[in-house]
């Protein structure tokens, strides 16, 4: 993972003369910010980043609002239905994007939501919901059931137990899951490419493809600069949540 990022970082600061050299170097001899200036001049990166931010933030929020109560039920109610739902969540992660894009497109077309930010957000919510549900189920199972039983014995009702006992313990897991859903939507390319046609609605990953010429020749310096700017938020967020993601998965595996 380090090699592509270091290569991207090096390329983003190289002038055209060094990019065309026969002997590539890791450290630019004459670092320049011209690639960043050209990237913003050639493509609407700020507007595209705003579209990506809107889609990622709203879809992550909706996914958490839906997944949290569902995960609690799956973790606390153990019967055939909950086990079948958990199995479906795991199996759904194996579905390739190309398998669902045509049904999704037809559904959104029927709802007049093709080339719509709302339609894209709905797709992102549906796509991130299974993994968010899986993660949150692991976090709920890591909360000792005895704490809820003790609160009930002290006279706390079901709602007060959930709000005062369970929710605070789940907060780190909810935040980590929300950040994961945000990263997933921020980096997503295929759905945005197919479902959004208007240039002013396109997201950052789609706009990056515009640095490729008609014959597939890349404007390497500005492309590397734009790709670096698009990559940094994901790397920073993943660095924050990677330990919690692993913890949530392991918690679910141990409890199940």
Image (spheres, rainbow, N blue to C red):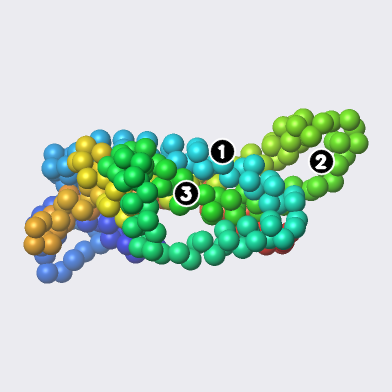
Residue 126 marker? 3
The percent coordinates of residue 6 (x first, y second) are: 32, 59
Q: Which residue is mark 1?
A: 65
Which label was assigned to residue 151?
A: none
Of badges 2 and 1, nearer the viewer stands 1
> Within 10 Å of the Cα at label 2, are there few (<14), some (14-19), or many (20+) other Cα atoms?
many
Q: Along the horizontal axis of the image, is 223 left or right of 55?
A: left
Q: Residues within 10 Å of mark 3 (few under 14, many from 20)?
A: few
Q: Is residue 186 left or right of residue 162?
A: left
Q: Secondary structure at mark 3?
A: helix
Q: Pick the quarter of the image with the C terminus.
A: bottom right
Q: Is the C-beta separation of discs 2 and 1 under 8 Å? A: no
Above or below — where is 85 with respect to 164?
Answer: below
Q: 15 or 160: which is nearer to us?
A: 160
Decide which of tag 2 and tag 1 comes sooner along the chain: 1
Which residue sits at x=64%, y=48%? 71
Choose the circle earlier in sequence order: 1 or 3: 1
Q: Which residue is mark 2?
A: 148
Distance between mark 2 and mark 1 Cα atoms: 22 Å
Q: Which residue appears at 33% of the width and 51% of the height?
A: 105
The answer to which of 28 and 213 lies nearer the viewer is 213
SS at mark 2 in the image: helix
Question: Which marked residue is nearer to the observer: mark 1 or mark 3?
Answer: 3
Judge by depth and name the residue closer to the eye, 21 or 237.
Answer: 237
Using a 10 Å C-alpha cutoff, classify the residue at mark 1 as few (fewer than 14 neighbours), some (14 to 19) or many (20 or more).
Answer: few
Would residue 48 be visible to someone looking at this image?
A: no
């Amino acid at each position: 993972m380090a090699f592509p990022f270091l290569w991207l970082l090096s390329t983003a600061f190289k002038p055209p003369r060094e990019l065309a050299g026969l002997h590539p170097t890791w450290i630019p001899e004459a670092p320049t910010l011209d690639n960043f200036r050209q990237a913003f001049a050639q493509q609407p990166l700020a507007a595209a980043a705003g579209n990506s931010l809107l889609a990622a933030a709203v879809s992550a929020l909706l996914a958490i609002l839906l997944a949290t109560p569902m995960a609690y039920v799956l973790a606390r109610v153990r019967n055939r239905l909950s086990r079948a739902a958990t199995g479906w969540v795991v199996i759904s992660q194996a579905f390739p994007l190309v398998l669902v894009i045509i049904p999704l497109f037809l559904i959104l077309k029927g709802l007049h939501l093709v080339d719509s930010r709302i339609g894209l957000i709905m797709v992102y919510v549906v796509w991130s919901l299974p993994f968010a549900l899986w993660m949150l189920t692991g976090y709920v199972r890591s909360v000792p059931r005895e704490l809820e039983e003790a609160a009930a014995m002290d006279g706390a009702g079901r709602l007060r137990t959930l709000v005062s006992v369970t929710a605070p313990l789940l907060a780190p897991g909810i935040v980590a899951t929300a950040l994961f859903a945000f990263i997933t939507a921020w980096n997503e390319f295929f759905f945005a490419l197919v479902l959004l046609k208007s240039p002013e609605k396109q997201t950052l990953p789609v706009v990056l493809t515009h640095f490729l010429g008609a014959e597939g020749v890349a404007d390497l310096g500005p492309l590397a600069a734009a790709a670096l700017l698009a990559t940094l938020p994901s790397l920073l967020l993943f660095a924050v949540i990677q330990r919690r993601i692993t913890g949530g998965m392991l918690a679910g595996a141990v409890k199940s």
